[in-house]
Amino acid sequence: MTGMLVRRLAGAVPLLAIITLIVFSLVLIVPGDPAVLVAGDTATPADIAAVRESLGLNDPIWEQYGRWLAGAVQGDLGTSIYSSESVTSAILTALPVTASLTFMALLVGTVTGLIAGVIAGIRPDTWIDRLVTTVTSVGVAVPHFWIAMVLLAIFSFRYDWLPFGGYVPFTESPYEWFRHLILPALALGASVAAEIARQSRASLTTALTQDYIRTAEANGLSRFDIVARHAMKNAAVPVVTVLGLQFNRLFGSAVVIEQVFSLPGIGRLSLQSVFVRDFPMIQGIVLFAAVTVVLTSLLVDLSYTYLNPRVRQA
Amino acid sequence: MTALAEPTVRRRQTFLRRFSRDRLAMVGVAWVVLVLAVGLLAPLIAPYDPDEVGLLNRLQPPSGAHWMGTDDLGRDIFSRLLYAGRVSMLAALFTVAVSVAVGLPTGVIAAYAGGAWDYFLGRFNDAVMSIPPLILALGIVTALGPGLMTAMFGVGLVYSPRIFRIARGSILNVKDETYIEASIAIGGSNARVLWRHAFPNALNPILVQISLMGGFALLAEASLSFLGVGVQPPQASWGSMLGRAFRELNRNPTMILYPGVAIALTALAFNLIGDGMRDALGNEKRQAR
């Protein structure tokens, strides 16, 4: 187990190195001079020169990259051009919001998706299976921010049951935290639920046709035991894979949901940086998101060893 | 030469026959064709000029004169929906084109050249895939500036690893087949072997992916235009129409209905086509039904 962890961590290093190159080169694809862009329309040549100096654009590219990378490794992602705030602290301030949102969305999505998938999977080709299959196919095609607006229109504007936006930290009031996050989490989690339901249904129907299930049946195990203890554990591997992939997508989709519900998370931060061309900020966010995703997929890989002992020997 | 080409042709016929029997996929094809046709013919079909502002007609409910009502500037929503569909579909097409233009040649090179090329191109694509798509697209838009073309160019780059992987995989699949060896042995140039023999085998799985990506691209366009970094006014797409409708959500919630349903149905249609193609190919393990 430890050996595998070390191997996997070592494998992630070249990947992370290339990610930093991609993130850094975002500045290089700017058409024209980034300094002119950042300084704005009313800048004098002196302003532009000052910006160029403060961004370190006069140095050779490799030196710029080295300096940025050395900072990033130590957790220093530079300073926002727009607010003069440290990028790292801005991200850390926004992180609890996005983390709460994605956590709730994953939870809501996984639970509903698993329930729907298992119900459909143990009764293939019945009306309930067809219902689940239809709803999930439609579910992956509906834009999540559209679901968000529909939920808002109903629960906040029409009936005034839930707040229409904003965020309350968990430490301040867990109840208000939940009330502010439930609609965004439902909207964001809908597509997760659809994917999980599809995948768990497919892998459960496959698992239930295997020989070891027939053996378990022959041994007189109850239907519940067969599904819960034997089929589910094998069916879980592809479901966990989907969960890992969904995390990557959720992080991006959260940008739009945060905008709809005025949640001051990382998505909002990145959108603000787009309009003011805040390069250090957007680079910091892209890097942070990528590293989070890489670490998550490491965790997902490690969970396989628990779910499927054969992987351990590989 | 014709004898060698025959299996590919036969396989394609089987594929088309199976695909055309898939009723759901055919519904998807019909819907996409309808949306494209309506978009192309928008100037003939639309009852009003989509940009005609009528301040006395603001936020009207659906009526005989305005089938879907009017928006916050009094513009006819039905007419706008037709024109916006054109923009959304073109944006999706452009995105997929960028992905293919980047992913296909690099995938072929990685598979054909192998070695260090394969390693670096592979790791590079892994890296791109581990960045959340919308966040990376926002990064690219920060660099290139907001606008429909730059935003969709960014999304196209972000999705190109999907094409890369499939192109690389399918070339690797056939690379060691006897018929490839044979055509190299009889003196076929690299380009000729690739184009005539390896490429046709890679085509079908790439088509599946292109169709599925059409759906992703449509949703990505909607997200970015909704956020205001995609299409810029006065031009409208389904996504930016949703953005406008969002601002009127409290006063006129029905406005979100039409563009939302249009996006969902079209994305669903692309998915149905992609699923149908994958089933028709039959060489991937089909999911238990």
Image: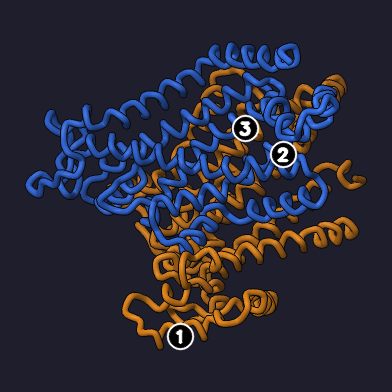
Q: Amino acid at mark 1?
A: Ala
The relative height of residue B174 versus residue B101 in the rendered view (above or below) is above
Left or right relative to B194: residue B152: left
Residue found at x 48% / y 50%: B153
* Chain B drawn colour: blue
Tag 3 secondary structure: helix
Whether residues under marks 2 and 1 lie with C-beta atoms below 8 angstroms apart, the answer is no
Residue B37's x, y, as percent?
34, 26
Q: Quadrant of residue A277?
A: bottom left
Left or right relative to B52: residue A132: right
Residue closer to the observer: B32 or A251: B32
Residue found at x 62% / y 32%: B206
Q: CA distance from mark 3 to mark 1?
A: 48 Å
* Residue at image mark 3: B206
* Chain A drawn colour: orange
Residue A115's x, y, as percent?
60, 36
Q: Amino acid at mark 2?
A: Arg
* Residue at image mark 1: A49
Q: Amino acid at mark 3?
A: Ile
Residue closer to the observer: B285 or A308: B285
3 or 1: mark nearer the eye:
1
* Residue at image mark 2: B168
